[in-house]
Image (tube, rainbow, N blue to C red):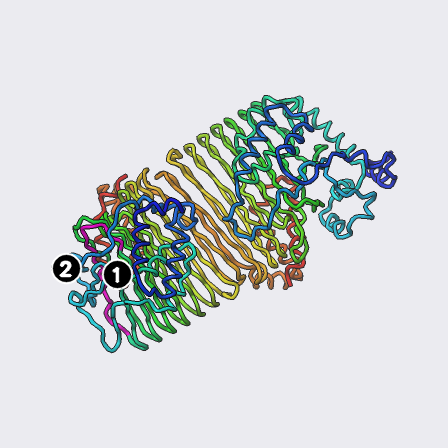
Amino acid sequence: MKSSNDILDDLAAKDYEFGFVTEIDMDILPPGLNEEVIRFISKKKNEPEWLLEWRMKAFRAFEKMSMPTWQNFEMPEMDFQKISYYAAPKSKKQYNSLDEVDPELLATFEKLGIPLSEQKVLAGVAVDVVFDSVSIATTYKEKLKELGIIFCSFGEAVREHPELVRKYLGTVVPHSDNIFAALNAAVFSDGSFVYIPKGVRCPMELSTYFRINAENTGQFERTLIIADEGAYVSYLEGCTAPQRDENQLHAAVVELLTLDNAEIKYSTVQNWYPGDKDGNGGIYNFVTKRGSCKGVNSKISWTQVETGSAITWKYPSVLLIGDNSVGEFYSVAVTKNKQIADTGTKMHHIGANTKSRIISKGISAGHGNNSYRGLVQVGPKAEKARNFTQCDSLLIGDQCGAHTFPYIESKNNTAIIEHEATTSKIGEDQIFYLNQRGIDTEKAVALIVNGYAREVLNQLPMEFAVEAQKLLSITLEGSVG
Amino acid sequence: MSTETTLPIYDLLTEIYDQQSAVPEYRQKAFNSFRSQGFPTIKNEEWKYTNVQPFLKEQYTAAVTEATVTTEDIKPFLIKGLDAHLIVLVNGKLNKSLSTFQSDVLISIEPLTEVPGYAADSISFTNNAFAALNTALTTSGLFIEVKANATINKPLHIIHYYTSDDNVFVQPRHMVCVHKNAKLDIIESVARDESKGIVWVNSVTQAYVEENAQFSQYVLQNGAANTRLVNFTEAVQHKYSLYNNFTFTFPGTELVRNTLHTRLAESATETHLYGLYIGADNQLIDNHTLVDHRKPNCLSNELYKGVLAGHAKAVFNGKVYVHQEAQKTNAFQQNNNLQLSDKASINSKPQLEIFADDVKCSHGSTVGQFNPDALFYLRSRGIEEATARALLIGAFAFDVVEKVTIPALREHIETLLNNNMENWYA
């Protein structure tokens, strides 16, 4: 009896009999953005009229918007007309076997301890892991279906559950929220849709990784997660392994919505291509993420580990509308070489007794620049709102930068808001102590950094946490010396 | 800039500028900068929470009236028991007859009629339209120069006296140079008589603290409601120098905006910035500070505390910038706020921008209320509520007040605090 890994190996070794071409949809639009393009995308996806209208509305809003200027980095020139908005599936270069894959990438996989089958999917080897995924996905799907949980691609959701999509789409991140959100709303390709019905506790961690079309969710992904009354779900986005990707701009939108007593835990590990040592290439990760605690006693928790992308620019936020609702944000952002991270969160306290907690740990190495930008806003009706914010920065090397831009706005005299931030480097005495015990400097730094980021890593689901820890060490390799 | 051009004040200032003949280049540059920026709007990040537009609507007259002010008028604004040299400025102009102190061998105190070119150049006008405007149009101010190695043993008490029945826009410009090894303390207070006009004060102060010099600046702001204060202060510090700034704002003046920049141009300096703002009624108190660490081994410490009652609105923006060269920097910053009324609002933004790795930097910011346990503790010991609240406010403010080293001034501040006791109830 062959193990599934063997089967995969065999498959990988075999020439793909049916050729790859059939897999690639030939409809690739020429670069450019106009109403026709949007009509085309919508038609391609067999979308109902209302969704096309919504896209159009977003496009019109997009046309009126200009690029923001408040960010703490040099905004790269961006020509929206030079992007092809329909190329599904993305023209990912496919390899025939792992031997063709960049050995450095493989070495990273090795260190992360990723099983062979997964390595192949991640590296883009044309193994029919899809089969594997399908089976995993279907077994899980059965189980989820029994509980009434909807977990499918966005396109499928539009077809199968139009009433839910229509009801909630754009309610948390409106189509005109910001230029990238508007662009996404106009041209989004696909994404994920999750609905947890009343009183259901999702028995497993949901992850795009197990979904067949995970591979194709591209540049303009859209995620919508709804937890109905009393529901609970933990959702994992991304993957600890480096993603090969040719797209420059990623403008995704994530909307979370919790009704009464519901809870969503959203974890991200982002490790996209950061560009080379001199900052050439790399992904611009401009994502709009927002959750709305609409119901009373509801909770939304964001956890993110950001190690990839040339520029990361995102602020997962929570609208604390329901009384007693809770928002949390845990973040570790690592920048090295010429990477830039401008990230943080917004906590809008609107309802009474709302609580929020922000723990942000920035690590800058090489020429990296790390900014924390956060807003804690307490409205006049948010009686007894409570916030605690801690944002620490760790600097490794004298060419990097750490910045904090916290905004605190209080309009209620029962609110208690605390903010603290520190910036420091790794103590020479700490390194010396570890050196003394036979641990080399690189490992010592990894150890110290992991300790420093522990508070956040602890929030990650188990499997993720282990990988994220390794990822941190790998990311910082070569930055000490 | 459509909104600005419709403001009568904008037209008036343009008119004043156009009437000048042979305008020096730095003034042209400054006015052009102002013209291109216009008065700041809330779209401007530095003015996000402070909307000055409603304060600019009124009709102003061009000329600042010459007023006769007597010693009797000044008397109520003297600080009890303070042993200081008195200097009085009336509507931004040095009044030698009211001042009890003149220049001597150690110090020269003269009206500043022309801003030295280098001083005008050193101020960045980016996001600084008011300073640009001041540079372009200032006509009066104070120039204080302490000679090298001189220690001025008594503080200078500078009273900025404002009086006007018409609405006026005053733009004084001050310069303080503390030369090598010299030491100077100044206390500045704003005095407003009962005249009816609105006085808009747009002032700029530049301080140069040279090697091993020490300069302490105490600023007291408790004018009448019809006064509006927009101050820009820039202190440049040289090696081994010490600069202390204390800013106390009390209920009264409806708009206060203090922009305080300290530029640590050389290494091994020490800087302390303390602020206490007590807001009530419809006051808007905005403190923007920047500590610009350019060189290594500097220490900066900042503590701003605020108590907000009534409909008061407070803004704190503290920025610490550590350049790559500024290794071994120690920079600390703290902002605490007591929000006593549900109509009051607080916007705090402590900000760190750090490009050096061998540094110790931290900041903290809090917003809170009276600790009910502490209040209960005091009440249970037979202390009536009003006194209990006053005690707690006193304790809250103590961290800042205790840093004042001039006893009479400290007592004066404590008195001002106690005078506001009725505000401690929501």
Secondary structure found at label 2: loop
Q: Is residue A191 visible?
A: no
Residue B42 vertical placement versus A276 (above, below) = above
Q: Quadrant of residue A183?
A: top right
Q: Which mark is residue A199?
A: none
Residue drawn at 60 percent across, 36 percent down: A184
> How far apart, in angstroms, are the residues tagged by discs 1 and 2?
18 Å
- Mark 2 residue type: Val
Q: Which mark is residue B188?
A: 1
| Apparent side of residue A287 relative to residue B218 in the rendered image (left or right) | right
Tell which subunit mark 1 falls on: B
- x, y percentage for residue B354? 51, 58
Tell which subunit mark 2 falls on: B
* Residues at marks 1 and 2 on the same chain: yes
Secondary structure found at label 1: strand
- Mark 1 residue type: Glu
Mark closest to the chain's N terminus, 1 or 2: 2
- x, y percentage for residue A398? 57, 63
Q: Is residue A365 magenta?
A: no
Residue A450 vertical placement versus A431 (above, below) = above
Q: Quadrant for the N terminus of chain A, please.
A: top right
Q: Is residue B159 magenta?
A: yes
Q: Which residues make up the magenta segment?
A: B151-169
